[in-house]
């Protein structure tokens, strides 16, 4: 892995270079082991929180971790193209529009003792904008090379806060052309439905059951692409104790190993059906 500026990362993508980098402000990492018609993102994976924000934040480290998507970056780490956030969503949320990316309240709790100063605010929005500059460059390059692309947008959620039985996996499709991509969505649901994990819960995948996939990443890619599908996929936090913060490595590694195989298989079936060339 190397440390690169946003402009250097963009230049490497445009030149179709193979690389693994962290951006020079350490806000996210990008890996391209091969140029393939699919990419994976874990945009709420991050836990980094700038030192100058900590004393002003009303939420402790555990409260922040509880609403983040821990280990989702590791789950996609075996895939050839990954975008993994390193900063906490409480600094700025990459799955929200830049105008709303900095929380004032989150899940019913006030976040800041006092409003951020202009330098802190501008720094966070600049990081948000830079991430999406890279997303746009990558999306354009993959569509240029392959005609169609599928993005696997991975999130997690706290299933114990629900007062009903909720699925282990959820696919959100509110921003997706369901007529055009219906088969790909159903195939992805069938794959997740059939996964075998070392957990006690029955593994079920539903569509738009707990979330409808209306995050900014999905909206951005859909609005700026010609022929790209975003599969916003939520995994319940069956891979950790969501209240204590203990992560179950055997479950995380199992998901990682299965995703490495199943995402590749699904993406190639998608490409065979939607290749625009």
Image (spheres, helix red, strand yellow):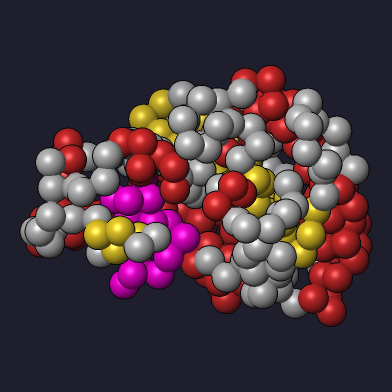
Residue 225 horizontal side relative to residue 83, left or right: right
Question: Which of these two is toward me, 195 or 265?
Answer: 195
| Residue 211 at x, y percent in the picture | 63, 64
Using the rendered view, name the quadrant where residue 119 is placed. bottom left
Question: Which of these two is toward me, 48 or 5?
Answer: 48
Q: What residue do we see at 69% from left, 20% from top?
A: 250
Q: Is residue 266 above or below residue 179?
A: above
Residue 160 horizontal side relative to residue 243, left or right: right
94 is within the stretch colored magenta: yes
159 is within the stretch colored magenta: no
Residue 198 horizontal side relative to residue 97, left or right: right
Magenta part of the chain? 87-100
| Residue 274 at x, y percent in the picture | 85, 65
| Quadrant that contains the C terminus | bottom right
Q: What residue do we see at 36% from left, 30% from top?
A: 3
How many discs appear? 0
Residue 65 visible to the viewer: yes
Q: What residue do we see at 46% from left, 53% from top?
A: 134
Residue 88 horizontal side relative to residue 270, left or right: left
Q: What residue do we see at 36% from left, 43% from top?
A: 64
Question: Which of these two is toward me, 212 or 120?
Answer: 212
Q: Residue furthest front?
A: 163
Principal SS element in the magenta part? loop
| Residue 56 at x, y percent in the picture | 13, 47
Q: Residue furthest top?
A: 250
Q: Is residue 13 above or below residue 126?
A: above
């Amino acid at each position: 892995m190397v440390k690169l500026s946003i402009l250097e990362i963009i230049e490497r993508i445009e030149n179709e270079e193979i690389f693994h980098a962290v951006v020079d402000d350490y806000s996210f990492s990008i890996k391209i082991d091969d140029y393939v018609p699919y990419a994976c993102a874990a945009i709420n994976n991050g836990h980094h929180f700038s030192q100058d924000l900590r004393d002003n934040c009303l939420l402790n480290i555990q409260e922040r971790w509880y609403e983040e998507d821990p280990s989702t970056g590791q789950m996609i780490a075996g895939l050839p193209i990954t975008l993994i956030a390193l900063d906490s969503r409480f600094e700025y949320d990459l799955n929200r529009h830049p105008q709303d990316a900095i929380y004032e309240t989150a899940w019913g709790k006030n976040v800041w003792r006092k409003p951020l100063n202009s330098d802190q605010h501008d720094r966070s929005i600049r990081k948000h904008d830079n991430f999406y500059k890279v997303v746009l460059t990558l999306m354009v390059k993959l569509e240029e090379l392959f005609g169609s692309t599928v993005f696997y947008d991975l999130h997690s959620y706290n299933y114990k806060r629900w007062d009903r039985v909720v699925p282990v996996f959820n696919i959100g499709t509110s921003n997706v052309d369901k007529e055009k991509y219906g088969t790909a969505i159903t195939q992805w649901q069938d794959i997740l439905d059939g996964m075998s994990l070392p957990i006690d819960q029955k593994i079920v995948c539903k569509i738009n059951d707990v979330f409808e996939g209306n995050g900014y990443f999905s909206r951005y890619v859909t609005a700026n692409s010609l022929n790209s599908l975003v599969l916003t996929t939520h995994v319940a936090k069956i891979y950790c104790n969501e209240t204590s913060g203990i992560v179950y490595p055997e479950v995380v590694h199992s998901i990682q190993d299965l995703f490495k195989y199943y995402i590749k298989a699904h993406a190639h079936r998608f490409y065979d059906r939607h290749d625009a060339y």
